[in-house]
């Protein structure tokens, strides 16, 4: 209680100062150098009419007349800095931690806890038959910034099933969304022509969830759970198949495999992202890299204590070293060809340099510092160039700075290259 009273007292003092503000004194600096004779002269000095040295310009800038207005507290000395600084630190830290706890779940030590918001249980294999009207049977909802969505989009692209299971690319705009952060773009002519329910093609993702749970909700009631992407919806029943990215990738690969077996003329590539007999090995690899890297970076970014961050950072450094060593003798993470694990890793590695290592403080430096990981990324996009079109890197990484404002109060977005520029620089 004492801390809050002190904060209120300082606020009242600041308001009172508004009535008697004066601009802080201006200290103008002069850039100088030492001449051969030992004389101090201004940089870029010129001779005036009397032969004396005069400065043509200064390295310092003139204070603009339209500079932002301030209280001038730090220059006035009141309240004392020894009192002001700890109070401001205390208030800003607790406001920040409150916002972080609202955003994600933490344990008592400030460690980020990734909860499951899974919708749909034990989904059946996807039906190969189209809907009765000849339209698509399923629809995917994906967001470009999300790595869990990116891995699904990459799977769709490599399996060649874009026409079978159309994708709605969501827009991240928390200010327009009724809940969560995803809104739907304007419906495509194709969606309208197939008579898809309005709630599934207009509005926001929260509306899609509400529609899919309509049988379980009272009239007028909205879905109360987290509205996450990726999301796979059965358009025939208007129900959610699943919103878990690993399950979606398994279902998509199974769909492509069965379609390939059904007709040799089917427009489906021969890639198998989850070969039969390798399921356990793939799942173990997913768990390992998820713990160390894919979720490790998020644990760094969402940590609210030093001990929580240090633990996560240690895992990320360990994961980078182990992955680089593993790829020194192997072309891919599992086996000799691309698999679902590589697509999951591709979604993480493309975001590491310009999102995770900066805004999340994920350690380890740039991917280019790990030659075997860098070569692995180049190999993937060379053998599977469709991967380069599965994400807009500037938008994906930029979203972290725009939307996670509690980690970037100034809302400044750094320079972010295109994915092709990034790969070329590895």
Image: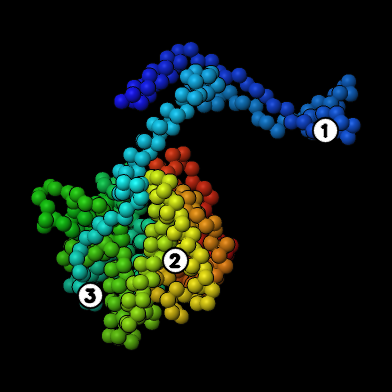
Q: Where is residue 4 in the image (x, y as percent from the top left)?
A: 34, 25
Task: Identify which residue is drawn at 18% across, 56% down.
Answer: 211
SS assignment at label 3:
loop
Q: Where is residue 343 in the image (x, y as percent from the top left)?
A: 41, 69
Mark closest to the chain's N terminus, 2 or 3: 3
Task: Identify which residue is drawn at 32% across, 82% down.
Answer: 276
Quarter of the picture holding the C terminus: bottom right
Q: Position of residue 409 (x, y in %)?
A: 43, 39
Residue 226, above or below 88:
below
Task: Identify which residue is drawn at 23% across, 73% down.
Answer: 126
Q: Is residue 232 left or right of residue 273?
A: left
Q: Where is residue 390 in the image (x, y as percent from the top left)?
A: 42, 65
Point out the frontmost of discs 2 and 3.
2
Residue 204, above or below 324:
above
* Residue indicated by mark 1: 34
* Residue indicated by mark 3: 125
Determine whether label 2 and label 3 are within 8 Å by CB. Answer: no
240 or 41, which lies in front? 41
Distance of label 3 from label 1 (alpha carbons): 80 Å
Other-residue count near label 2 (Cα within 10 Å), few / some / many at <14 / 14–19 / ≥20: many
Residue 94 in sight here: yes
Q: In which quarter of the image is residue 147?
A: bottom left
Q: In which quarter of the image is residue 253?
A: bottom left
SS assignment at label 1:
strand
Mark closest to the chain's N terminus, 2 or 1: 1
Distance of label 2 from label 3 (alpha carbons): 26 Å
């Amino acid at each position: 209680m004492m801390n809050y009273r002190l904060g209120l007292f300082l606020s009242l003092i600041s308001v009172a100062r508004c009535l008697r503000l004066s601009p802080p004194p201006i200290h103008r600096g002069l850039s100088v150098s030492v001449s051969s004779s030992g004389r101090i002269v201004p940089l870029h000095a010129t001779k005036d009419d009397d032969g004396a040295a005069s400065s043509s310009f200064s390295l310092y800038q003139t204070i603009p007349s339209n500079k932002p207005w301030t209280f001038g507290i730090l220059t006035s000395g009141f309240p004392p800095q020894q009192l002001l600084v700890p109070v401001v630190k205390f208030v800003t830290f607790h406001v920040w931690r409150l916002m972080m706890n609202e955003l994600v779940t933490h344990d008592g030590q400030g460690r980020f806890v990734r909860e499951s918001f899974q919708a749909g249980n034990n989904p059946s294999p996807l039906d190969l038959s189209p809907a009765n009207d000849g339209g698509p049977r399923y629809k995917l909802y994906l967001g470009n910034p999300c790595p869990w969505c990116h891995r699904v989009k990459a799977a769709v692209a490599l399996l060649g099933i874009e026409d079978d299971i159309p994708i709605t690319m969501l827009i991240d705009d928390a200010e327009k969304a009724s809940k969560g952060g995803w809104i739907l773009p304007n419906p495509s002519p194709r969606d309208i022509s197939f008579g898809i329910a309005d709630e599934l093609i207009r509005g926001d993702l929260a509306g899609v969830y509400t529609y899919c749970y309509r049988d379980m909700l009272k009239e007028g009631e909205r879905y109360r759970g987290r509205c996450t992407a990726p999301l796979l919806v059965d358009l025939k029943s208007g129900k959610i198949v699943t919103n878990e990215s690993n399950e979606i990738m398994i279902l998509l690969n199974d769909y492509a495999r069965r379609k390939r077996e059904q007709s040799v003329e089917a427009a489906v590539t021969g890639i198998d992202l989850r070969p039969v007999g390798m399921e356990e090995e793939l799942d173990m690899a997913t768990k390992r890299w998820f713990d160390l890297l894919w979720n490790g970076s998020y644990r760094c970014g969402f940590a609210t204590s030093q001990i929580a961050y240090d633990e996560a950072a240690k895992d990320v450094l360990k994961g980078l070293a182990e992955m680089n060593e593993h790829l020194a003798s192997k072309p891919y993470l599992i086996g000799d060809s691309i698999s679902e694990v590589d697509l999951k890793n591709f979604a993480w590695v493309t975001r590491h340099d310009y999102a995770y290592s900066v805004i999340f403080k994920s350690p380890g430096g740039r991917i280019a510092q790990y030659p075997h990981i860098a070569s692995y990324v180049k190999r993937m996009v060379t053998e599977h160039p469709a991967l380069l079109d599965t994400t807009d890197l500037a938008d994906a990484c930029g979203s972290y700075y725009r939307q996670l404002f509690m980690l970037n109060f100034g809302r400044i977005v750094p320079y972010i290259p295109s994915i092709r520029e990034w790969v070329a620089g590895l």
